[in-house]
Amino acid sequence: MLQLTPTFDIERDVWRLLAKGDTVRSRDNVLVADSQILNVERDDGVLYCWRGATGNTSIGKYDPHTKQNKLLYTFDKQVFISSCSLNREETLLAVSLTRSVKGGEYHFKPVSKYLTLLIEIHPVNNTKVIKAVDCKVKVQFLYPHLSRNSVLESHLLVAAEDGYIDHYHILLRSQEGCKVVMQNTEHLVKDRVTDEFCWVQWDSDNQRLFFLTSREKYTLKCVQFFPDHNFDTLFELPLALPNNPFTSVRFINFGHDHYQEREKEGINLVVFTDRTGIMCVCYSHPLHGAEDYTYTIAFVHRGFSKTFTVALEQTVPTDIKPNLQPFFIFLGHYVVVYLAGHFLHLINCIQQDLLCHSLFLSGADTHVDELGVNNVLMSISAHKLLDEWMGRIYTINLNQDFLLQLLLSTDRPEAQRLAALHCVMVHLESDQDLENKIIYWISENMMSFNAFDQIQEFILGSLYRTCCQQSLSLNKVLPYSSVFEKKELPVALTAIPGVKCTPELLTQPVFKGKARSLQGYWNELQWIIERTKYFETVPNPRYRFSQLKGDWTKLQAALNSEKTKSFNYLQQLEENTKKVLSVVDMWHLDKRVLPLFQEVDQPQRALIGLMVDKLRDHLNKYLPQLGKKKTEMLVVNYMAKLLELLRHMLETLWLKLNLGRTVLCLKQQGTSEEWTMFHIMCRILEAAKGLCLPLPPGYSTLLSVLGVRCLPRHTFLLYVDRGFLHLTEPFVSRLMTDLDNSTSNEELKFSVLKRLPECLAQRVCQLWDHPISSACITRQCVRRLLEKYTKTKALVQLDRDKVSSHLEFLPLSYLIAILTEMEEQATNPFEEQKNMDARFVEEIALKQTLIKLGFEGKLTPGEE
């Protein structure tokens, strides 16, 4: 499930290089603790130490960008380092250590006094003792900027186990050109950050300090350090933690003390934040039995917490006692909760309405090759994990192959498969190959699952990833999953075997100081919390495509209406559609494989415009602060990406099946590949209709062409009658011209013409070279001429000499006279530039009259 990529290995990147020197002994003769990781700074530099052959202790730095090691400082005797930090300019080294007394050949007993030193290392010069106490002390330099410009000032945090944190201001000065030394070392300026805490966490990426106070009740506070070296308490949140959560003061991300005994009791607590406005407070609960385990995640940005109680499943040998302290890893939109040998959960931080959008694994699925059962693991920053036991740092990602395997496994619960699909679509970065694999999987598993429709989930998940990740405020108003469209949720999506979830509202956080005026993360977090409270008070803030069905039914009626009001509304929708299609036309115009977006598909164009109109109104109602211009751009891009995604799905499968342009010809029978494509397009059509989604213009024509090639004629007509296939003008025109006038083809053409609206039938009838179509053209022409004649009331005089051959049939003679009189004025309704042949109309009219009177079989050719 987890894919760990080692970015630093003390054995590979340090020890083998050091072993080449004369001052280092073979690793077989050195304690494991002799080489250890001390800290990871904001610039990703790794501080480490080792003990040389003479018993001295050295500190070095590994630069992952240049792959180079640098010796920073060497103590001439052995010391135990519990905390270490290097300033950004690499001129000062802060070290918290304890002296040791040798108690055996390879056993050392630390003394009670801790020293905290400031050491000048550019070059090695002066050492300043800033603390000499009987409790542990942690040190951390601030990194307000990552630029390499030299600054003659450094700032250091010193956190003591006694419960206070100081902020030291250290002034530096250049000496003799290249030397950098401290000024006024006797009186270093310091500020008190807090006088009391029982837990503290340093966030190096964002220069924030989280700490927990417990005077009256447990309160989480956050201090933000600014680039101007000032700091302010911006955030407070009361937490309902278990009783006696800590047996000693906890330090998170203040370096790594290999000599500190690991806490086997109490809770494990960590805070995660993300620039999009996410804040999660994760903590475990004390273990009260061997049957289940409990942990809580407080989703501060959502205003509630969820407590998960998990039935433990033993997957490790009974002679191994695993460490029952889970660790939490933040992966952007997910929090990984891992308890080695028991479970691995991937909790969705954004969509917490349903458990089926989080992934719950147990048993063999929880195994991670790189991690042992008793490894000492620590999450040091987003996507990074430290294994203290092995001396390695990993970058963590989700395993794509494992997630795809979950999708392919038919014996997996549907909730797992849905969660895996969303992990792939939403969390993992856009990858063309990965997206194609999912499209192939959909094409091979076309039938909808019992609990969800995989095509709908793929479409909505893709749109969410491309449009909604920029701001969490859009998460509550734009569609995320098709399961929200269901009136009743299936049990398979609401209950997870072995997991019990208990939600609880959080106390509202308090924003203090500059938090209300700051831009960036704090502004986004406040805005999300305020919008979340607002969304809880209004009905249906999330846009649902199914709400369009009533409006779409009315619009379909308006398409056939000639009312001015309907015409104006349709013109407005057409303008919306033009904006969307203008964006689509700019994307991959030269790479198109299918004839989409090349015809005027009026129903689909109207549906596109309707969705733009409704979605824009929805966003303006619930997120008015976005502004009309930004909302308009967001909606147009959303719809354009929807149409482009459908086009991409079709073209990917078209190329996979190796279909060419000859498929568009109706004269040949369809192949098995064409039948597969037709079936896929039918499923996409069904999924789109279920959500009332528009399809790219030209989709209905292509589907009808494949239907004629692949289906028996009666089945094709049945699809048309049931409304599954839509007869478009380009398709019917192709049908009339491509197929010959054989008996079966004539029957098909007549059947299709009967099912067309009258106006469309009149337009396409002229394309069919057939006597019946000629008769239709004639009747229409005569009707138009007579209607015009009735209006003008023209007087027609019969010329008996010209019509002597037809005197015995006066009605026909009168008709011929009228048509002859109007021949020069009457134009072909289908070809404006050419006059209608009166003789042709005369013959057709006579023929039709004889048929009506029953004289067709009685007359000889001469009598006609």
Image: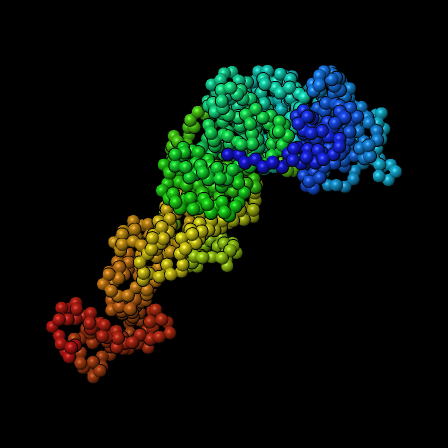
Question: Residue 585 location, x and y as percent?
Answer: 50, 56
Query: Up-down: is 403 above or below 236?
Result: below
**Left of 406 or right of it: where is 270?**
right
Quarter-of-image position of residue 380: top right
Asked if residue 112 shows in the view, the reply is yes
Query: Up-down: is 161 above or below 778?
Result: above
Query: Up-down: is 754 above or below 272?
Result: below
Quarter-of-image position of residue 772: bottom left
Name the colour scheme: rainbow
Question: Residue 153 location, x and y as percent?
Answer: 79, 34
Asked if residue 167 shows in the view, the reply is no
Q: Please, which residue is most extreme toward the left here?
A: 858
Q: Please, which residue is most extreme toward the bottom here?
A: 801
**Left of 566 or right of it: where is 282?**
right
Instruction: State the quadrant of the C terminus.
Output: bottom left
Q: Nearer the viewer, residue 89 or 811?
A: 89
Residue found at x 66% / y 25%:
32
Q: Total label count?
A: 0
Residue found at x 50% / y 39%:
400
Residue found at x 20% / y 80%:
803
Question: Residue 260 location, x and y as percent?
Answer: 66, 20
Q: Nearer the viewer, residue 767 or 18?
A: 18
Residue found at x 28% / y 65%:
740
Query: Up-down: is 259 above or below 413?
Result: above
Question: Residue 314 location, x and y as percent?
Answer: 47, 22
